[in-house]
Image (tube, rainbow, N blue to C red):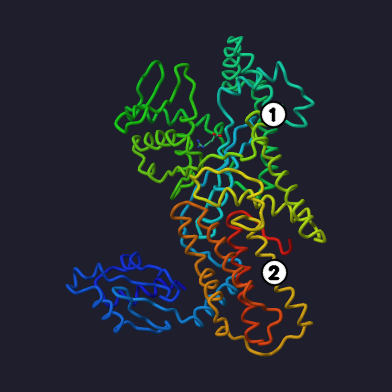
Amino acid sequence: MDYKKIVAERIKQLVELDIETIENLIEIPPKPEMGEFAFPCFQLAKTMKKAPNAIANDLKEKIETEGFEKIECFGPYVNFFLDKGAFIKATIEKILKDGENYGSSKMGEGKNMIVEYSSPNIAKPFHVGHLFTTVIGSSLYKILSFEGYNCTGVNHLGDWGTQFGKLIYAYKNWVDEETLEKEPIKELLRIYVKFHEEAETCPALNDEAKMYFKRLEDGRAEEVQLWTKFRDLSLVEFKKLYETLNVKFDSYAGESFYCDKMEDVIADIEAKGLLVESNGAKVVMLDEYNIPPCIIKKSDGATIYATRDLAAATYRKKTYDFHKNIYVVGKDQALHFKQVFTTLKLMGNEWADDCVHVPFGTVRFADKKLSTRKGDVIFLDELLSEAVAKTLEIINVKNPELENKEEVAKKVGIGAIIFTYLKNHRERDIVFNWEEMLSFDGETGPYVQYTYARAKSILRKVEENSNGIISDVELDYNKLNSKEEFELVKQLEGFQNSIMYAIDKLEPSMVTRYVIEVAKSFNKFYNQHNIANLEDESNKKAKIKMVEATCQVIKNALNLIGIEVVDRM
Ligand code: ARG
């Protein structure tokens, strides 16, 4: 139930403002003693030609109070106090009834969404930046799907471009097949780096590389076969990572997929009179928009990254008729997307306005050792294994008796990394710090997962104590009358609201922040109230329902950010 809406509707019956304006004006009072919602009357003063305090008083007298404990004035504000018992009952019952679907809706029904994320480059390591897009994108995909949008998750692999000419040359000259079988990406990276080193002293290598890329573009068997090999080997490694992270895609249409789709787009650009010559290259001028031209073809006739993006967006519109086409890509590519979207718009595509770049910040490591161990590259599989190993160490100290420790360490360790990425506004830079992100207190993944496990253990304990005897006393939600309980249930009720913010801002951190607050509220309750030893059965039963509801909400919220819960840790 949306209580804010109810409040707005009650007010609407009495004043000359539309419902949206009223909803925007409604505030959450700073103290619980002032109720749950407050409506300020300043804006009405002008039209009603009356002092705000007097208006507030009038409204208070006339408003229908049903469903509220009381309605009061605080100066120019009308404050609404929820009928706590009824609110708590309705909220908990709804959560338990909806279960895994609590928080979901049909709001996106009939709308197709493209969410593009991860998009690593073939034959190059998957780096921490790629992990950032992967977790944000995967979370947005889950959140949007939860609200009924029809999502297509796209992995726009970097699997085309002149670098493949270099790689083919490098492969033919320096590859070590044995290492390639065992650690394909590391070996491909090694020979790729070697190519650049060698080309420093022998620039002719660049011409060789160009020749090989040309042969690849022309579809020559040997080059195509090598390219396929690089792509397949890389994908095997990427897919392992996705499995560990529980990330899925509906399409792996990367850059190469658009090879045969670029000519149409280029022809279209030309037909619209947008293609001009500049230093031998073909470009679309964007001076009017104060940005550099969008290069369509280089002077040697080769297409580039931007050309493939123009073809990709056009293809996506045709194939999926998207409502929004979302690109989760680092903020260093902001200009690129501006150029691509502006060009699409100039071509007369109104839908260019539905293409959205969702940028994010950079990632650094507090622990210098880690970031410099292998040049500047951090191998993600190592990062994840380290998180799991460190978590296992912590569990071995805290709870050495725990069963299936490895499995728990995996969920918690990987969850900790995902949580770190999604904890703050995505454009904020992140500094990884092991100690901080693996800590069981503070705003961390392990803290929230621990809270869940703790709540589950209460439920187990109650069950054990009861020896299977169920009393027939009716549960009574009115017994949940402490400040901590009301605060907790209010939090639980706000789940969908946090999802709406997340969608509005394309910001999964709204859900992460939310689940942190739920965990905090639960722990406040936990520290004040003992359930297992409670004599009053009607109270105990109500509290149990509340704990069950809390578990459900934490589970649903963590699920949306890609983290699994554990019952014990
Ligand atoms: N492969 C690129 C990179 O690793 C990211 C691709 C972004 N997506 C796009 N449609 N341009 O930097």
Q: Which residue is mark 1?
A: 229
From the top left corner, tell me how far across and down residue 110 is, in percent. 46, 57
In the rendered image of this protein, does residue 494 appear above or below residue 564? below
For the point 61% across and 66% down, the residue is: 100
Inspect the image, locate mark 1, and give the three-letter code of the amino acid beneath it.
Answer: Lys
Q: Which residue is mark 2?
A: 456
The one nearer the camera, 342 or 132, is 132
Inspect the image, locate mark 2, and give the three-letter code of the amino acid beneath it.
Answer: Lys
For the point 58% across and 44% down, the residue is: 134
Mark sitting earlier along the chain (1/2): 1
- Measured Cα–Cα span from mark 1 to mark 2: 48 Å
Label 1 close to label 2 by CB (< 8 Å)? no
From the top left corner, tell me how far across and down residue 171 is, in percent. 69, 20
Q: Is residue 298 left or right of residue 464?
A: left
Whether the residue carrying mark 1 lies under 8 Å from ligand 1 is answered with: no
Q: Which element is circle 1 on?
A: helix
From the top left corner, tell me how far across and down residue 411 is, in percent. 70, 54
Q: Which element is circle 2 on?
A: helix
